[in-house]
Amino acid sequence: MLSLLRPLLAACLYLLLPGGQCRMPAYNNGFHYQDISNGNGNGEIYFNGVRLHVESPQHAVSAARGSSVILPCHYHYEPELTAPRRTRVKWSWLPANSISAPVSPAASARETEVMVAMGNRHRSYGSFQGRVRLRRSAPGDMSLVINELQLNDTGRYRCEVIDGLEDESVTVELELRGVVFPYQSQKGRYHFNFFEAQQACQDQDSTLATSEQLFTAWEEGLDWCNAGWLADGTVQYPITVPRDGCGGLELASGLRSYGQRHRLLHHYDAFCFSPAVKGTVYFSKHPTRLNFTDAIQACATSGGQIAKVGQLYAAWRLMGLDRCDAGWLADGSVRYPITKSRAYCGPPEPGVRSFGFPPPFLKFGVYCYR
């Protein structure tokens, strides 16, 4: 609003000739405005010695799913005011899937309101209702507390403080700690369009990974030669050891990108992101091996349910699950997690080993989630 007022003030100063009149609309927010165009003619205005500052000591915060997190935001006046003022605070959110996705200006992603507060009154919106509050640990503290973090809470949060014509804001990125893993269809390699890849990840208690999450996974050693969809509609794959068939020996290690692909017509694998699990993933102890149907029943008998792929990856990476026994998972695949390499447990590198999707009548162990 201040930017809209400046041209009007400049016009008034220019037109204020002898006998002329220029009336400003009556508005008073408690600040005194003063013309500082003396000598430079630019007609700028400023609050008489008072400025609103909105800051955050952290511009990125990470947390585990199911936990609580604080997104820091503080405001103050310079110089300090002698009496408190009625300020309005608005927290809004841009989901992680929308941050890096290229869109046209007409269809640009819009921030969603999380909470609005003025004085002791506040209101939260959507899926954040009942889960958010302002910390208010000290004067000017408008930090947002989010309880029971959900899988889709990641993204960019904006803390906006409004005082009359003054409007300042700061952003904080929220990330969930988790693991990125490649995922293929039961039909084999490259069978997902973008929307099918989204659904496949959701079915495994995960979401499509962002480019940033895949880059972090590559930095941590993820090497995979099959291209997969990401949340922004691009198709990429991470290579730590350059080789023929994976971009060639002449290319340095890094993320190989096909760029944006048609979300309906083109088909690839998926890179999924799974945050920490709230429960426990365990190998069900059973006297005999089980076919797929019996494996589902065994988990139910033990008070749980058959684990999903994302849950197994999260338990392996974030909780150190290590088991050299192949077991059924909910999608019909057979896998096992290794954190400490040893004989007869596959390659020397840690990871989740996969037997693919064997016929359901074959017998293995089972991984359950409770």
Image: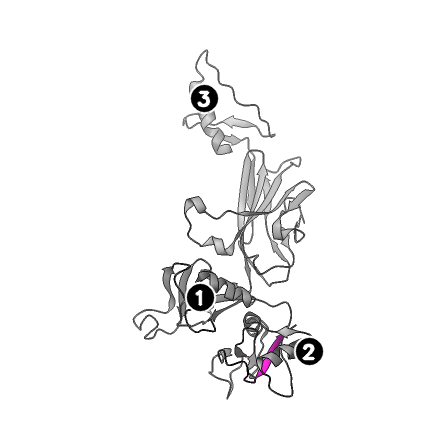
Q: Residue at x 37, y 69 (%)?
A: 253
N-terminal label among 2 and 3: 3
Above or below, 119 against 148 in this view is above
Say which residue label 2 marks: 301
**Residue 322's quadrant in the figure?**
bottom right
Specify the segment rendered in magenta.
Answer: 359-370
110 within the magenta span:
no
Residue type indicated by callout 1: Phe
Residue type indicated by callout 2: Thr
Q: Residue at x 44, y 57 (%)?
A: 232
Judged by depth in the image, the label closer to the viewer, 3 or 1, is 1
SS category of the residue bearing label 1? loop
Say which residue label 1 marks: 192
Q: Mark 2: give few (<14), some (14-19) or many (20+) Cα within 10 Å.
A: few
Above or below, 359 against 269 in this view is below
364 within the magenta span:
yes
Say which residue label 3 marks: 13
Q: Is residue 209 visible?
A: no
Residue 204 point in image, percent of width and height:
55, 68
Are dots 2 and 3 in contact, CB under 8 Å?
Answer: no
Compute the Cα span from label 2 to label 3: 82 Å
SS category of the residue bearing label 3? helix
